[in-house]
Structure formats: structure tokens, C-alpha cells
Amino acid sequence: QVQLVQSGSELKKPGASVKVSCKASGYTFTSYGLNWVRQAPGQGLEWMGWINTNTWNPTYARGFTGRFVFSLDTSVSTAYLEISGLKADDTAIYYCARGIMNRGSLDYWGQGTLVTVSS
Amino acid sequence: DIVMTQSPDSLAVSLGERATINCKSSQSILYSSNNENSLNWYQQKPGQPPKLLIYWASTRESGVPDRFSGSGSGTDFTLTISSLQADDVAVYYCQQYYSTPYTFGQGTKLEIK
């Protein structure tokens, strides 16, 4: 069955970096895009962008450029989200989600990774 | 960016009654190439990731109960739950995929009256 399993919660100090992983199984990794979605505490969903698992080309939403990097290791069907220069308002749950290539529907989601930024 | 606005922000409906959630896009999200509207609906229960309910504005995802239906075209869309069940308590989000960034609505919290 399709699964996306994310790495565990992280507690980081302001200015530090974090790398969240998302390991896919149960399907051909390169047949679907990989999206990232942020949810701040008690808030709604925010689409951060996606990475094309065939071309490795990332697309970032406004507000997620510069400090946010999407990457892949297709040999282990894993996607990564790296955030540098962490700020308190980066505190959120970060979800990875499989995206259908010819439409932006996110049909399978990881369990989410809570990143807490606090001094 | 396309702005998605949902109404109401919260809704309380009695068990067995109809629940209706609206979503409005700031511009048309109708794909001329296939005459389909690029809209998803998701359900998010507390402590869980979102679940895809509907895509192309009205196509139910596999396994989604038929009490959930989507309608609308152009800029105005509706998610309807025909007979509310206790398990339907959740926050519901619309999302457009007409153009990046694939923006979400702010969410509608559905509760039992």
C-alpha cells in the first residue's frame, strides 16, 4: 500500500537548520510529484511547493524561496525539505504529499513532522 | 496568486442534516483544455493529515462516501454533505490547482449542532 513516512519531530534554536525526510513506498516514486505543505499551530494549510521526481525541478511558492530547499534521493524513494536560518514563525507541522502529475491533487500524505523553533 | 475564500468559517449542523460549504476563487479555474475545474476538497480531522475527498471539483476520490459531493464552475464551488454523520466532524479545505502556487482556502470547521 502507498505510504509516506516522515522523520520525527525536531526542536531547533533560531538560526539553525533542519532537514525533514519523507520516504515513499508502495508505488513508483518517479510517477508522481512530491509536494510540501505547512500548517502552523491552529492554522490552515499552506502549499509550499513541489518537486518533479523525474526532472528534479522544484517549484516554490512565494514566501518559501531562499531558505527552503526541496531535494530528492530517488535511489531510496525519499524526498527532503531543508529549512535554513530558522525563525520562530517557522514553527509548524510540515507535511509531504504525493501529487498526481497531470493535476494538483494530493492523494497520499505523510503523517507530518513538527518543527519547533525556540531559544 | 489565486486567492481561495471559503464560507462560512465554521458551521454547526444536526446529525442527518445537510451541510454546505462554499469556496470562491479570485479568478476562473476552469481548464479550457478539458473543460474541468481545477479544484480539490480535503477533510482534516484533529491530529491527522488532510484526506483528499474530491478533485476536478466534482469527482469523488476512491473510497469516499457518496454523501460527499462537489459542484460549481468558474469561480464558485460547493461541497455538500447530504446527511451529516458524527464521523464528518472536521475542517474542510478547498484548493485550486489551476496555477502555481496551488493555494488553499482558509478552512471551514464543521461541528455537530
Image (spheres, grey):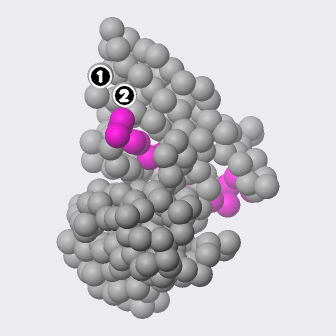
Residue B37: image quadrant is bottom left
Spot the residue most to the top: A119
Above/below status of A25 relative to B4: above
**Residue in the image at 62% along x and 56% along y:** A108
At mark 2, the secondary structure is loop
Q: Is residue A22 magenta?
A: no
Q: Amino acid at mark 1?
A: Ala
Viewer-closest of A4 and B86 = B86
Chain part drawn in magenta: A28-42
Q: Amino acid at mark 2?
A: Thr
Viewer-closest of A27 and B92 = B92
Residue that label 2 marks: A91
Inter-mark Cα distance, 1 to 2: 6 Å
Left or right: where A88 falls relative to A84: left
Left or right: where B19 falls relative to B5: right
Residue that label 1 marks: A88
Q: Position of residue B60 (x, y in %)?
A: 57, 78
Q: Position of residue B85 (x, y in %)?
A: 54, 69
Above/below status of A36 relative to B6: above
Whether residue B77 can be seen here: yes
